[in-house]
Image (cartoon, coloured by chain):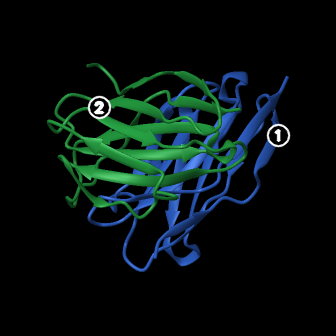
Chain colours: A blue, B green
């Protein structure tokens, strides 16, 4: 069975501060991992994905995530938060066959001016 | 089309009525997914289509929920005898690379917000 756990349903950071959103996965096979972002009243869009190439993955808008097998983690980071980063962030894992995606419960990011 | 299109964007209905939600995936995408997003909850998987067939219907909450896909394109999610707990945003996503080693990503529509009074 595959699943993801996102620690912290709400995270607040000051503008310019480091953003760290946590995601741990549970998978019996090598997973593919994703981070999606959802802005208010919009669908989800892909930030970045890990597909067993480089363990440090760079995405859009300055976000990156590091796959750590020993910790079963795929935390999302951004060195300096911007007001426009305020959104809901979802971590997801898919099977090797790629026909099923499992999402975490999401983390709402607030950026304080 | 350019992206995944869902309609209606908002639907308010009375308890006990039937509703249909439509999803038009990105042209050429063979895989189509329905998810439900309730307030404060993550994404709950409902059903997955590969072409016109549904290999995985395990997420449908009850027999009041059904979905079909025709022509390998448009999909309709039908909820019969709606209940207040069905109120949620129903998200559709499509993908072009299911079942391959280089797994693709999901492209999402903006969702259909269903409110059952």
Q: Residue at x 45, y 53 (%)?
A: B46
Q: What subunit carries mark 1?
A: A
Q: From what the image shows, is residue A101 above or below residue A30?
A: above
In the picture, the quarter occupied by the C terminus of chain A is top right
The reply to whether label 2 and label 1 mark residues of one chain is no
Residue A12: image tag: 1
In the foreground, A30 or A45: A45
Visible residue check, residue A59:
no
Q: In the shown orientation, is residue B63 left or right of residue A99?
A: right
How far is mark 2 from mark 1, CA to CA? 35 Å
In the foreground, A55 or B76: B76
Image position, residue A60 (x, y; %): 48, 33
Foreground disc of the pair 2, 1: 2
In the foreground, A21 or A28: A28
Quadrant for residue A84, please give it.
top right
Image position, residue A102 (x, y; %): 48, 59
Q: In the shown orientation, is residue B105 left or right of residue A88?
A: left
In the foreground, B112 or B40: B112
Q: Residues within 10 Å of mark 1 (few under 14, many from 20)?
A: few
Image position, residue A16 (x, y; %): 76, 30
Q: Residue at x 48, y 51 (%)?
A: B64
Q: In the shown orientation, is residue B43 left or right of residue A12?
A: left
Q: What subunit carries mark 2?
A: B
Image position, residue B84 (x, y; %): 69, 42
Visible residue check, residue B112:
yes
Instruction: Provide the residue designation for mark 2.
Output: B25
Q: From what the image shows, is residue A59 above or below residue B2?
A: below
Secondary-structure class at tag 1 = strand
**Are discs 2 and 1 less than 8 Å apart at CB?**
no
Q: From what the image shows, is residue B61 above or below residue B4?
A: below
Q: In the shown orientation, is residue A79 left or right of residue B56?
A: right
Secondary-structure class at tag 2 = loop
């Amino acid at each position: 069975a595959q699943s993801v756990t996102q620690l912290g349903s709400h995270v607040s950071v000051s503008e310019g501060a480091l953003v760290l959103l946590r995601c741990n996965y549970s998978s019996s096979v090598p997973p593919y991992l994703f981070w999606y972002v959802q802005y208010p009243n919009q669908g989800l869009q892909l930030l970045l994905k890990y597909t067993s190439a480089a363990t440090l993955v760079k995405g859009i808008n300055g976000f990156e995530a590091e796959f750590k097998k020993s910790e079963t983690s795929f935390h999302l980071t951004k060195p300096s938060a911007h007001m426009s980063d305020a959104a809901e962030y979802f971590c997801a894992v898919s099977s090797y066959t790629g026909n099923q995606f499992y999402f975490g419960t999401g983390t709402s990011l607030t950026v304080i001016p | 089309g350019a992206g995944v299109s869902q309609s209606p964007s908002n639907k308010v209905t009375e308890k006990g009525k039937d509703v249909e939600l439509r999803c038009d995936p990105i042209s050429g995408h063979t895989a189509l997914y329905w998810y439900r997003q309730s307030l404060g909850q993550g994404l709950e998987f409902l059903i997955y289509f590969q072409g016109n067939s549904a290999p995985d219907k395990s997420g449908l909450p009850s027999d009041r929920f059904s979905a079909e896909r025709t022509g390998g394109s448009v999909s309709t999610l039908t909820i019969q005898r709606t209940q207040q707990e069905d109120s949620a945003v129903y998200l559709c996503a499509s993908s072009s690379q299911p079942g391959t080693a280089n797994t693709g990503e999901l492209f999402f529509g903006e969702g259909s917000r269903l409110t059952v009074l």
